Image: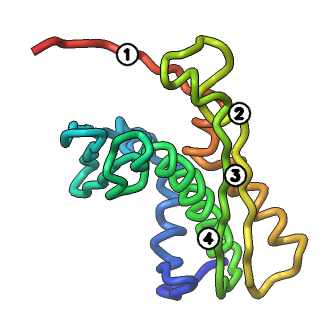
Amino acid sequence: MSSSSKNLNGLEVSKMEDFVKEIRTKPDVVKNTNGPWRSRVTWQGGLKAKAYMRNHTVTFDEPEGLGATDTSASAHEHLLSAVGACMMTGFVYQGTLKGVKIHNCEIALEGTFGDIRNWAGLTDEGTPGYPEIKAKLYVKADSDRKTIERLWANAWKHSVVTQTVARGAKIIPSLEVL
């Protein structure tokens, strides 16, 4: 698909095509796009936190049952949302490059903790994390089911966040006491 300045799904197709060409042929573009990406999270009192990413901020809190104030979504809810948002980005991006008009798209995510007692320090058994995350796509688009299924499979298969979570990125903790 080639188009000079066509807009599809709210995206300028020619810019997307140019980006794909650049990452195919220019190692410096790949290097700059790969990162490093950074976030800095600061404590805001109680169980609240604020994350700073580029020129954006996101707040975190926990449910009142933990003694928190429930003023924002928790980190684990942001994780579910990040997985869904990254899959959504991939789905829309790939669909747009394939010329698929998307009318509506939603991803419902769900996860249940392995054992909250582990998080609370009451046991070292099991995991406090999500042993599995369910992600279901609801979509209305101008395309056949097989194409949509292929786009959806590629969306999670190539999602940076989904694959980071699924493959268990190595976390390298360090400490500096001030």
Residue 131: mark in rendering? 2
Q: Mark 2 and mark 1: span between their CA atoms?
A: 22 Å
Q: Position of residue 9 (x, y in %)?
A: 56, 83
* Residue behind mark 4: 92
First in sequence: mark 1 vs mark 3: 3
Could you tell me which residue is drawn at 67 percent across and 53 percent down?
110
- The residue type indicated by label 3 comes to Trp
First in sequence: mark 2 vs mark 4: 4
* Residue behind mark 3: 156
Q: Please determine whether, in this image, residue 7 is positioned above or below residue 154.
A: below
How packed mark 3 is, by other alpha carbons closer than 10 Å (few <14, some 14-19, many 20 or more), is many
Q: Mark 3 and mark 2: span between their CA atoms?
A: 17 Å
The mark lying in front, picked from 1 and 3, is: 1
Q: Mark 4 and mark 1: span between their CA atoms?
A: 34 Å
Q: Quadrant of the C terminus?
A: top left
Determine whether, in the image, residue 58 is placed left or right of residue 22. left
* Residue behind mark 1: 173
